[in-house]
Amino acid sequence: MIVVVAVTGMRASELLGLRWRDMLWDRSEIRIRQTYVHNQIQQGAKTKLSQSSVTMHPILAQLLKDWRSESSHAQEADFVFASARICGRKPRCGSMVVESHLRPAAERAGVIETSDGKTHINGELVKRFGFHTFRHSLTSWLMANGENPQIVRAMLRWTNLNMLSHYTHSFQADKLEAQGAVLKKLVRSGNPSDREPERELEGVKSS
């Protein structure tokens, strides 16, 4: 479940609503046809564009096939992430997966820190931590690695690029690295008194 969300940016409701018949293996796509919200299956998706297919790389396809081979619910009409407790009649409970597995694993790995009821990632306060966090993480990672914004928009299935400013985050380590890149252009060997030649500082003005 985590891998699928992490690399597709799929919403939790879309993930839980997946059935095996939605895997379009020959087209390398995952079809979004329904969602699972408040213990109910709902046809369609959040928006018209959200109802489009999600890209499925061959590596992801193989992981899903491996999971299918292990699952007790592998028929075309079965949920991809079916609840074993109720014999696959419904998907697993997303909130229980987060609280029982995702959050404890993230805390053990040092990804998140919780104090006074607040959650931090890399020292930055986050309002909530769960499957939706991966939509933000995927967007931030793609943009930090120079991906075309239009490709990011298509992957996350947004109607426009305005969502980039909401989903892209720069954490402390990223800001330190960016500042360090500037300092390396301004200062030699980390010694503030050993300045680069004036030609290297063209366009840089002190306030």
Image: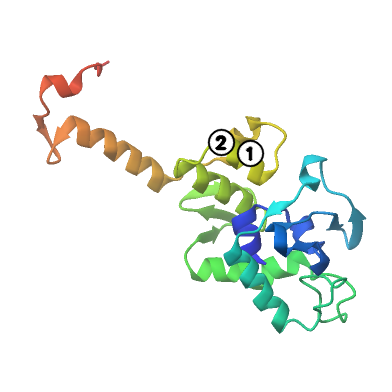
Q: Which residue is mark 1?
A: 153
Q: Residues within 10 Å of mark 2 (few under 14, many from 20)?
A: some
Question: As displayed, is residue 101 above or below residue 187?
Answer: below
Question: As displayed, is residue 29 above or below residue 21?
Answer: above
**Does residue 69 appear left or right of residue 118 in this picture?**
right
**Does residue 52 appear left or right of residue 5 in this picture?**
right
Could you tell me if the residues under marks 2 and 1 are in contact, i.e. CB atoms within 8 Å?
A: yes
Q: Position of residue 182 (x, y in %)?
A: 27, 33
- The residue positioned 54% from the left and 48% from the top of the image is 125
Q: Is residue 126 visible?
A: no
If the image is split into quadrants, where does the C terminus sit?
A: top left
Secondary structure type for disc 2:
helix
- Outermost residue to the front: 26
Q: Which mark is residue 181?
A: none
**Does residue 44 appear left or right of residue 49 in this picture?**
right
- Outermost residue to the left: 194
Q: Depth check: give the residue in front, 88 or 54.
A: 54
- The residue positioned 21% from the left and 32% from the top of the image is 185
Q: Depth check: give the residue in front, 44 or 205.
A: 44
Q: Position of residue 134 (x, y in %)?
A: 61, 54
Q: Depth check: give the residue in front, 27 or 87.
A: 27
